[in-house]
Amino acid sequence: MPVHAIYVEEEVPAEYQADIDFNAVEARKVQESGQGAIETKKDPLPTAEARKVELGS
């Protein structure tokens, strides 16, 4: 489940530290380029409703 992918900053496993660093660098590049954040919403996948029912949400 995605909730298991959320860590307090001090508890992020070492194997994910490179991803945090990468995201920080890329976010800075986007910000400095003047581009906006991703603001468009995509349509859900065709299987989304069935998955919601399966998960009970």
Image: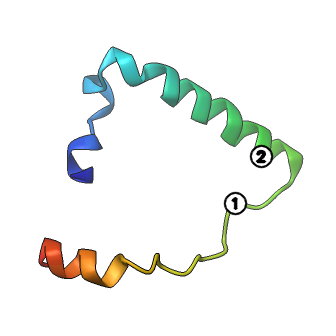
Which residue is farthest top?
14
For label 2, the SS is helix
Query: x and y percent of residue 28 in the render?
Result: 72, 38
The answer to whether residue 24 is above or below residue 38 is: above
The answer to whether residue 26 is above or below residue 12 is: below
Residue holding disc 1:
37
Query: Residue at horizontal 44%, vertical 81%?
Result: 46
Badge 2 density bin: few <14, some 14–19, many ≥20, Cα 10 Å: few
Q: How is the image coloured?
A: rainbow
- Kind of residue at disc 2: Val
For label 1, the SS is loop
**Residue 28 seen in the current view:** yes
Task: Specify the label residue 4 is tagged with.
Answer: none
**Residue 57 seen in the current view:** no
Query: Residue at horizontal 37%, vertical 77%?
Result: 47
Query: x and y percent of residue 22 in the render?
Result: 60, 28
Residue 46 or residue 16, whichever sits in front: 46
Residue holding disc 2:
30
The answer to whether residue 54 is above or below residue 17 is: below
Q: Are marks 1 and 2 in contact (CB under 8 Å)?
A: yes
N-terminal of the pair, mark 1 or mark 2, is 2
Judge from the rendering whether residue 33 lies leftward or rightward of residue 25; answer left or right: right
Query: x and y percent of residue 35 in the render?
Result: 83, 56
Residue 1 or residue 25, whichever sits in front: 1
- Kind of residue at disc 1: Ala
